[in-house]
Amino acid sequence: MLVFIINRLIQAAGAVVVMSMLVFIGLYLIGDPTAMLVSPEANDLERAAVRQAFGLDQPIWMQYLTFVGNAVRGDFGRSFLTGQPAMQLILERMPATIEMVVVAIGFAVLVGVPLGMLAGLRPKAASTKAVMTVSILGFSLPTFWIGLMLIMFFSVYLGLLPASGRGSTVNVAGVSLSVLTPDGWRHLILPALTLGLAKAALIIRVTRAATREVLPMDYIKFARAKGVRPRRVVGVHLLRNILIPIVTVTGLEFGQAVAFAVVTETVFAWPGMGKLLIDSIIILDRPVVVAYLVLMVFFLIMLNLVVDILYMAIDPTAREKVRDQ
Amino acid sequence: MSIASPQAPVVAVETPFQRLRSQFLENRLATFGLILLALIIVPSVLAPWVAPQNPFDIGKLDIFESQLPPGSVSESLGITYWLGTDGQGRDVLSAILYGMRTSLVVAFVSVTGALLIGATVGLTAAYFGGKVDALLMRIVDLQLSFPAILLALIMLSVLGQGIDKVIIALIAVQWAYFARTARGTALVERNREYVQAARCLALSPLRIIFRHMLPNCMPPLIVIATIDLAHAIAAEATLSYLGIGVPVTQPSLGMLIANGFEFMLSGQYWISFCPGIALALIIVAINLVGDHLRDILNPRSAQ
Amino acid sequence: MRLFTGKLATSVAALMIGAMPLHAADLMIGIKSEPSSLDPQFHVLATNMQVAFTMFEPLVMMDAFASPQPALAESWENVSPTEWVFNLRKDVTFSDGSPFTAEDVLFSFDRVAKVPNSPSAYTLFTRQIESVEAIDDHTVKMTTFQPYPLLAADITSVVIMSHLAAAGDAPEGKTTTELNRGEGLIGTGPFKFVSWQKGADFVVERNPNYWGDAPEWDKVTMRPMTNAAARAAALLSGDIAVMEDPPTANLSDFENNPDLTIAKAPAGRVVYIALDQQDRESPGISGTDTNPLMDARVREALFISIDRHGIVDRVMGGLAEPAGDLVPAHFLGSSPDHATAPTVDVERAKALLAEAGYPGGFSIVLGSPNGRYVNDVRIAQTIASMWSRIGVTTEVEASAPPVFFQNRDEMKYSAYLGAWGNGSGENLTTLNALVNTYDREQGKGTANGGRYSNPEVDALLAEAASTMDDAARGAILSKADAVVLDDFGIIPVHYEVPVWALRNGLTMEGRADQYTLPQYIVSAE
């Protein structure tokens, strides 16, 4: 187990090094970040001074080594735009993203599990066919398109919900949350729904497959034969046994959703770290992009690790099956 | 192509293709998808000949005919704008046809590229096994655990904009799926007699992999490729929407949607909505076809 | 006020479910981008200045027409061409109650050069200043290195911070990070700081110690909403009462909407096309070996083939004025001969091309930033379409702004779309940046990406730069401007007209510098 964990950590480090190097050099080659930042009225000497202050006048390999040297001490550099430590900037935006993703995943589970079970229990019903067809849509239509359609319907046509922004927040232990105010919820619903629909579609599919796999098992047949009420069979015996794949997929999808929030946040101008990433990519704010990446790679690999460990603890043989879903 | 579907009609003389066709057409939804797909692809491919206007011939665009509602008749060109015009005075229908072309080209090329690279990696891993296999699959796993959108974003942020760059980015995010599937299939094929025989003949690994194993591993890869086309179209649209995909002057469907969105609030819905519907239709059509194709070709998932 | 609150309250009640009650005099503004910092001396960025001007004031403040007016300095005079004496107001206190004196001015001007890590330093506005001295508690003398007529305009961007509140251990006193947290953000402005959440709301409340007329609002919130369509939706639903930059596509709708009003500012930023005028094989031109843009007749053909009214009406939604000059007519040093935009003349343009030896035209690539200026790519595409009609087949190459500017600086474009905002109210800065011969050391022609070069223009501009008398300087600038335009050295397209949309019942004076300042937003009564 320990070897396994260490192995994963080494992989994580490798991925971080490769990614950061690629991005570091790529962003350097593509354009001049100072062009957007420095006032157009500045002369070339003033512009050169800014480049020097950012270290952009150094050869690229030197810049990278300086970055690595600082990064191992936990310093990921300062944002070109705001002058703030890049990592701090990202961490400040993180609660908004996590909040939206949690609500989205929560929605996906609440909708996806019951529908998936229903579909698994009644494979031939018309409702199942409808659910499965809709789930194909939820899964394959691009998120941004769903978001735009929701904005068009709920914000523009009905005028019911705001089209963007985060609404009012409440500060809880230094973290600002919008789930505690009605205004916050009004702003949260559409982005969370947009992000959650695709995840719901996935969970429907996983739940359905798991249900169909568990149904023919002896203990279900036994429980039924014993005269246990159908509701209890489904609610307790079945649910308990399909929970493992659902939890695993939900866990893995959480990481994917955090990454995918980039799109949702752009559509709804949600002030999370995904929006920050896009803005930073467009103005070539390299320290922020690299710091985001390092954080994300680390987060994803940790998440995978935790899911794997939990999974192996519960069921060492069933892992491949879930991955194949 | 061993198919053991209970509903399969038993007809004595039938080529595998005919069987596939009759099985496919049995499903009404999938047939509908196929027709829809044809209705979208054919005019898009033939866009230069069938589109009312060439949206890239900017000398012909008239700024005074911009933002016209669907059904308006052009005063200067004498054509009818069935889906209206956009902010540049471009016929939205023509823009959709050309935009769809761009989207389809990106999708086809990137999926084909990903399939070739993925199949090569997967087959190599399966054929050699051992350390080569472990190393290659470790890379595949690592990549699969990394969200595709993020990888594409990062690739494009360092490559810059352009159709070619979008294709490269999409190949980079898709090849691993093919590699995994190819390896799975090839592991089975590796132990088949024909491979053993080829090995005994001391044929080169290259030849065995590509000439003998690859054709037999194709069906599941083609199924994935079909569905992946929809993913690639969606991904390209998303990236273009985010402003880092195709250049704004060569609009794909995603770009058309993004460009037109500002007009939506003022009631000129068609500029963004029509390309949006086209995007949704093609994705749905491909999925309907792909899903059914998978059920036929892959008995395991047909359940 | 009551009218406004009542109206907003009903529409809000109709549209919102479980909305929070609005306070009597709260104002919510949807701004187009977020400030990068609250430190008023960190980053020269319009949003940062706008936020700073709610809490701080400069010695001299621009009015809506970009003309310098007394603020913390009640008057000033040139005692010699290089010496300026500013008489400070005596009745001013900071929001924390401490008095405003010359010491605060010295501290603030001294701090400018000491702020580290700045992506665009405020030294831009102080680089001509050799020294700042206090003559007494309420008199300050500034000395410039050489005669510099634009000093008063320059220091409108340097706000005065409290030397007591902003004192600190760092060389610059309170650091940018501390100021971002709200520490030491003490100014003399009409509002004082309440809170700021990055990426989200910036909130100020009325400064009870303000020396001038008290603003109408108890509390003002500026909410960054980068997506214009989303901002418009928020205004329509009553979430915000004022929005910056409504999408041009929506403007006619907004004007017809009884719940909304529109505020406009005097025309300002000029959108122009720069043409490569170097004797070389121009990178974006094909179909000819030499650079056709060296020929003034070709430049004129391109100049008169643009239908400026078409662009203003159809692309800009009326939010612009066709331009024949580099600055609007009310600027000092504009050219009266070029005050009206030329009319489009396709036949003459074709004739000029033929005369210049290009009867079949040529091909050219027109560079454009994507998302830097209002509708930039759409303008470029429309111009491309108009040029193509006279036989100059034009292809637009649109890039993300950092890529665009890098290309421009490396002179990879034969023609590009640019824009120039002029905060000084006179033509000198525009001409210096856009058409003076490029000179890296002297900082001349910094945005002259076409490398237009005319010794006559350079000489006139040098003369203007040291002419302290406004009228005389204006005349020299007009002359230089006319020379460039008669030479078709650069192609002005239109002036942007900054615009705001407000809930009905509110009025604001639109400022040429585009700052949305809540002290100038009032309810109509």
Image (cartoon, rainbow, N blue to C red):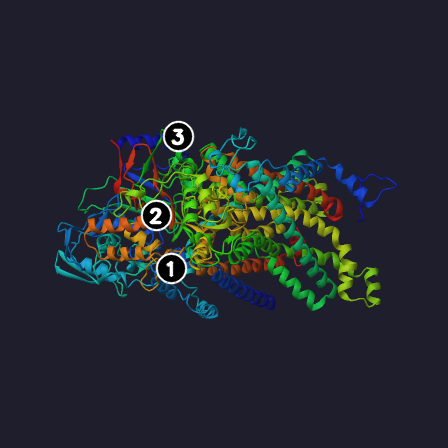
For label 3, the residue is: C14
Indicate the amino acid at tag 1: Gln
Q: Residue A25, how many percent across, how many down?
A: 50, 64
For label 2, the residue is: C486
Tally of numbered discs: 3
In this orientation, which residue lies closer to the viewer: C290 or B130?
C290
Q: Residue at x 80, y 46 (%)?
A: B3
> Is disc 3 placed on a helix, strand or loop?
helix
Quarter holding residue C184: bottom left
Q: Residue B226, how many percent across, how many down?
A: 68, 47
Q: Outermost residue, right direction?
A: B12
- Nearest to the eye among marks 1 and 2: give it: 2
Q: Alpha carbon of mark 1 to alpha carbon of mark 2: how far? A: 48 Å
The quarter in which the C terminus of chain C is drawn is top left
Q: In the rendered view, does C133 fall on the left or right side of C181?
A: left
Q: Residue at x 55, y 56 (%)?
A: B151
